[in-house]
Image (tube, rainbow, N blue to C red):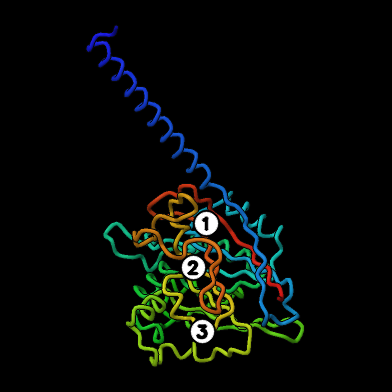
Amino acid sequence: MKTLKQRKKSVTTFLVAILIFTAAFTLYFIKRNIQINKSFIVTQNDLYFSKLPSSFENYKILQITDLHSMEFGDFNEDLIYAIDKLSPDVIFVTGDMFSASELKKDDNTYDRYYNEDSLPGFQLLKNLSSKYQVICCSGNHEEGIDSIFNGKEWESRDRTVDNAYNRYINELTNLGVKFIDNSYTTIYKDGQSINVYGIYYSFLEYYSTGSIAEDSQTLDFLKTVDKNKFNILLSHNPSGAEILQSYDFDLVFSGHIHGGIIRFFNRGLLDPSRKFFPKYDKGLYQVGNSQLFVSTGLGNTKFIRINNSPEINLITLKSK
């Protein structure tokens, strides 16, 4: 029979073995997820609508979001190759193509003369705009830099001022990229059309929390929504999507949540503001009469993704 000393030694050995195994598995798990985050997956969904114009049957929309200056291959060549293989009809970009911290100087101020050409997101959009129609809305990182460089009041922002963000916007606009922050554009195909609206990141947050009144003139662009038309909304942040139900957008594209960053049992743990279990974190949701699609996006910020592959998304429109 083992003595008390021998039993204690056995227990200690067992606990040390468990500790070593746990540490080794944790290290393997982290390294594996770091490696996974260097690649991406392509998700494909067919979405059905009763109001879809016949010309847009099988119309392919590619969504890119939350790149945060991530690169997949040199100059994002792997990403571009995958997109070219999918051959989308249009590309929707739902914000955060760079991180605001990239433009921050050592003294914690932001560099108005930062070289926008050096941003991987700029180079990606420049490449894609030569082949595809590209429509963008701002994320919180673009909106943050825009407000720092060009003022809080979005209607009075002067795009002629020479700063990094204005150059980013103006150069891409000149290449054909369409920015629809608090505005909309129309896509035409074979004599029929669909409308695509975009909303600033901050506006949905303020509107959903009551900081912007429903009769505010800042929301006048939403009053142009014709419910008899097929309408799409690009909104970086899906939080507060319920407030938009009365506008009857047929389809809403969002990102921002990064899939909840850490995913367990098909649930996201955190949103970027460190709130637990975000309501809309990944995939398709029915919100009133709208279908809301939330992409996990491509990049990271402060936390690495766990069980949460970076992704681009191909949505094919179909008639009911």
Amino acid marked by disc 1: Leu
Q: Choose between 236 and 76: the one closer to the eye.
A: 236
Residue 228 figure quarter:
bottom right
Quick one: which residue is furthest to the left in this view? 4
Quadrant holding the N terminus: top left
- Number of on-image labels: 3
Residue 104 x %, y %:
34, 61
- The residue at 71%/57% (across/down) is 85
Please report the residue visible at 60 percent of the width from the left and 61 percent of the height from the top.
313
133 on left or right of 278: right
Residue of label 1: 298
For marks 3 and 2, the one nearer the N-term is 2
Image side of residue 52 versus residue 182, left or right: right
Identify which amino acid the numbered label 2 is placed on: Gly
Q: Residue at x 44, y 71 (%)?
A: 165
Local packing at callout 1 (Cα closer than 10 Å; few below 14, some 14-19, many 20+) is many
Spatial CA span between label 1 and label 2: 11 Å
The answer to whether residue 285 is seen in the rendering is: yes
Quadrant placement of the C terminus: bottom right
Q: Position of residue 185 (x, y in %)?
A: 59, 83
- Residue at disc 1, secondary structure: loop
For label 2, the residue is: 95
Residue 15 horizontal side relative to residue 257, left or right: left
Contact between labelled residues 3 and 1, with CB atoms less than 8 Å apart: no
What residue is disc 3 on? 183
For marks 1 and 3, give the CA distance: 26 Å
Q: Residue at x 38, y 70 (%)?
A: 145
Alpha-carbon span between mark 3 and mark 2 = 15 Å
Q: Are marks 3 and 2 in contact (CB under 8 Å)?
A: no
- Label 2: state its secondary structure: loop
- Against 163, residue 53 (above or below) is below
